[in-house]
Amino acid sequence: MSTTAPVTVASGEPNIDGYRSFRLGEFKFSRDEYFVYVEWPTGKHVMSADAFLKALQRDVAWQFFYGIVNFDGVVGTVNHYGTVDLFAGRYNDVYRKAELDHLENFDTSLIKATFEQMLDDWTNDGFDPFAAPSETGSAFGIKNGNNRAAITRHGHPINRHFLDVPQDEPTIYPEAGFEKDIASFNLFAYLSRSQVTWNPSVVSVCGDSLYCPTTEEYILPIIHGNDRVEWFIQLSDELIWQVEDRDSGSARAKVTMRAGDVAAMPADIRHQGYAPKRAMLLVWENADPELPSLISSGQLPSVPVEL
Ligand code: PHB
Ligand code: FE
């Protein structure tokens, strides 16, 4: 993963709106009151500043996640677990056919440090890129302080949509001698207090099996392209998933999940979730580092079961 070697982030002086610009290889990033601009040798792209910061926050916090993180249909990253590709138009049929796409590979430490400084410089006081829209202030306007507490924070009061979730903790009766080995907590109570949305966090590790529950509200701010199968277990409420072909973006499925539903998302898709109300989701990941090459070489199928 990322190293601690010092890296030099290429950034410019603040512009007229107070924001620094950043360079990563031949990519250039800048922002003004409303928008973020991404430039590369064959093109230029614009995103709303709030959508960009919400995606950037997750890419940084997840250390580039598994597979692909699409900020939108044009710009994103591919994790190679030690290095990361930054791309524009690579997973977009129209850019590919017009040969306007661009991709560069960076050491994880350099892209991580650049993204962290960009997130810090471009996130204003009062805007929380992890929060649901009705729980945060505005991302827009000229530079106004920072929100370092939000972009590096942890948790607490019960969310307004989860006030009915019981908060009692389980009682355990360990055999004598096992008191230090057995522990428990109320996962629903823990999730009911999460302040952040669309941010799976690892709560259990058993070999390569990772349980990553998360609470969701509004729209997943990135479009994730899988490099392995992911299982979803809907713990409460409802989520709608738009599922597309990972490489071309053509539609594959629309999946509505209600409490108790279980779905396996194939390894060759990209997907984006919608949550009308705060909802609890368990994302079950297989962290085996061999999976991406076993799947891309055809030795393993991209679905976990054939029906
Ligand atoms: C996913 O892409 O699988 C994903 C990402 C963030 C979430 C849930 C699922 O909060
Ligand atoms: Fe995913």
Image (spheres, rainbow, N blue to C red):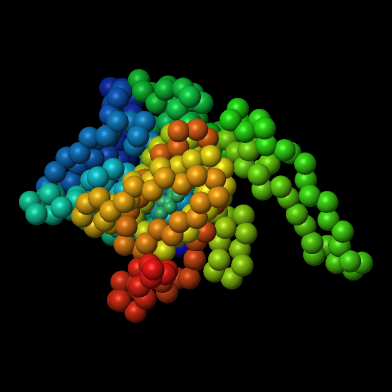
Question: Which one is in front, 173 or 262?
Answer: 262
Name the residue rendered at 21%, 55% in the picture. 248
Residue 198, relative to residue 49: is it above or below? below
Q: Where is residue 278 in the image (x, y as percent from the top left)?
A: 52, 35
For the C terminus, give its image quadrant.
Answer: bottom left
Does residue 214 appear in the picture of this structure? no
Does residue 242 appear in the picture of this structure? yes
Q: Where is residue 4 in the image (x, y as percent from the top left)?
A: 49, 58
Question: Which one is in front, 277 or 174?
Answer: 277
Question: Which one is in front, 177 or 143?
Answer: 177
Q: Position of residue 141 (x, y in %)?
A: 35, 20
Name the residue rendered at 54%, 69% in the picture. 208
For the view shown, which residue lies furthest in the front direction?
307
Residue 67, relative to residue 40: is it above or below? below
In the picture, residue 55 is in which quadrant?
top left
Count of numbered labels shown in the rendering = 0
In the picture, residue 194 is in which quadrant?
top right
Name the residue rendered at 27%, 34% in the picture. 47
Question: Which one is in front, 186 or 261?
Answer: 261
- Left or right side of 227 for 193: right
- Left or right side of 123 for 19: left
Q: Where is residue 22 in the image (x, y as percent from the top left)?
A: 30, 40
Name the residue rendered at 35%, 34% in the picture. 51
For the view shown, which residue lies furthest in the right direction?
176
- Left or right side of 9 for 37: left
For the view shown, which residue lies furthest in the bottom direction?
299
- Left or right side of 274 for 168: right
